[in-house]
Image: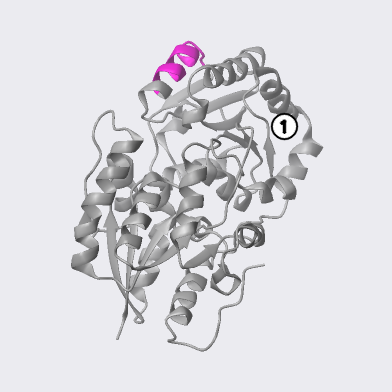
Amino acid sequence: MKIKVMTVFGTRPEAIKMAPLVLALRADERFEAITTVTAQHREMLDSALEIFKIKPDYDLNLMHKGQTLQEITADVLTKIDGVIKKADPDIILVHGDTTTTFAAALAGFYNQKTLGHVEAGLRTWNKYSPFPEEMNRQMTDDLCDIYFAPTELSKKNLLKQNHPSDQIYVTGNTAIDAMHETIKDDYRHEIFNDLDSQKKMVLLTMHRRENQGSKMKETFEAIKEVVLKRNDVQVVYPVHLSPKVQEAAHEVFDDVKDVHLIDPLDVVDFHNLQAKSSFIMSDSGGVQEEAPALHKPVLVLRDTTERPEGVLAGTLKLVGTNGENVKKEMLRLLDDEEEYQRMANAKNPYGDGHACERILDAIAYYFKRTDVRPKDFV
């Protein structure tokens, strides 16, 4: 009898990282795949689903204008309950640290279902940074039965909180698996029609709740100052749909010729734009994992990160949102070729493209369909 595996996700970043796992489940005769989306982020989620040609079995369609964390949590918790009862999965897989992740895990717990956490064990140890993701992740780990930690450090974090070692598998990150499907040598995008091929292209993303407001504007002003003073750099910024982010971006950058504000990109466009950039400035968690696989330095626009492996390896640098520091580090990568090469050529600590394979083998091992425990990613 096949193992019934329900995957649950609701945002674009989750969809990108869960898509290769959904596709792997569907292709593996050991499993019956059940795909459930909450649509916590409707438009951006749909874009990723279309790219990977995934049609969900269940769509809760929860998103509404001005939704609060409390509303998302309550809606997921109540509406997914009926789906779980109807589908009756053997195991529910959630991903990462979104509100969908925590609420779906809680609903699974209430239904006494086996729970697996993809990308388990990431920590900043500061419950408000990132907010609400840090506690979503920790509370989800407390509810789960089987843990797919992307790195050895993530496993150590889980052990530190007394999660059972025999249920922790170091798999690498599924983000790297996804990039095998998206990066194209012959990629082109209309944004390149507006860019100067003689100038370095810096890719910017910034959207996190804890950065919105004065921190975001200070960061933008620092980037603006660098761009206005030089004639060898241009910035491409796919602006998040959040009204607060949109307002700040347009207020600071609208009059800056070499800062190009564009609509959010689908996963193929975004991965390939990363690949063609000189370096990346971002407060995104996913970018911190993806860029090292492309040998692109990342200036992390946060004061903390739950992905310190990249900092230790040297491919990421925490620069925060202080304007003077942002300018200093941006100029360092523009002018110091030795520093640039050091970061660009640092070893990728996040995966080898076989995370999904390890996760599926671990599920089969958990349900005693094989006696062979999968080897950890190192």
The front one of 314 and 368 is 368
Q: Residue furthest bottom?
A: 371
Q: Position of residue 147 (x, y in %)?
A: 51, 65
User: Is residue 181 rendered to the left or right of residue 65?
Assistant: right
Question: What residue span does the magenta drawing correspond to?
Answer: 246-257
Tell me: residue 376, above or below residue 332.
below
Q: Quadrant of the C terminus?
A: bottom right
Q: Is residue 96 visible?
A: no
User: Is residue 158 rendered to the left or right of residue 261?
Assistant: right
Q: Is residue 137 visible?
A: yes
Please tell me which residue is depicted at 57% across the width and 64% down the height of the picture: 163
Q: Is residue 255 magenta?
A: yes
Please tell me which residue is depicted at 64% across the width and 43% down the height of the picture: 296
Q: Residues within 10 Å of mark 1 (few under 14, many from 20)?
A: some
Please tell me which residue is depicted at 36% across the width and 55% down the height of the picture: 106
Q: Amino acid at mark 1?
A: Leu
The front one of 181 and 15 is 15
User: Is residue 372 rendered to the left or right of residue 115?
Assistant: right
Q: Quadrant of residue 75?
A: top left
Q: Secondary structure at mark 1?
A: helix
Dominant SS type (magenta): helix
- The residue at which mark 1 appears reads as 333
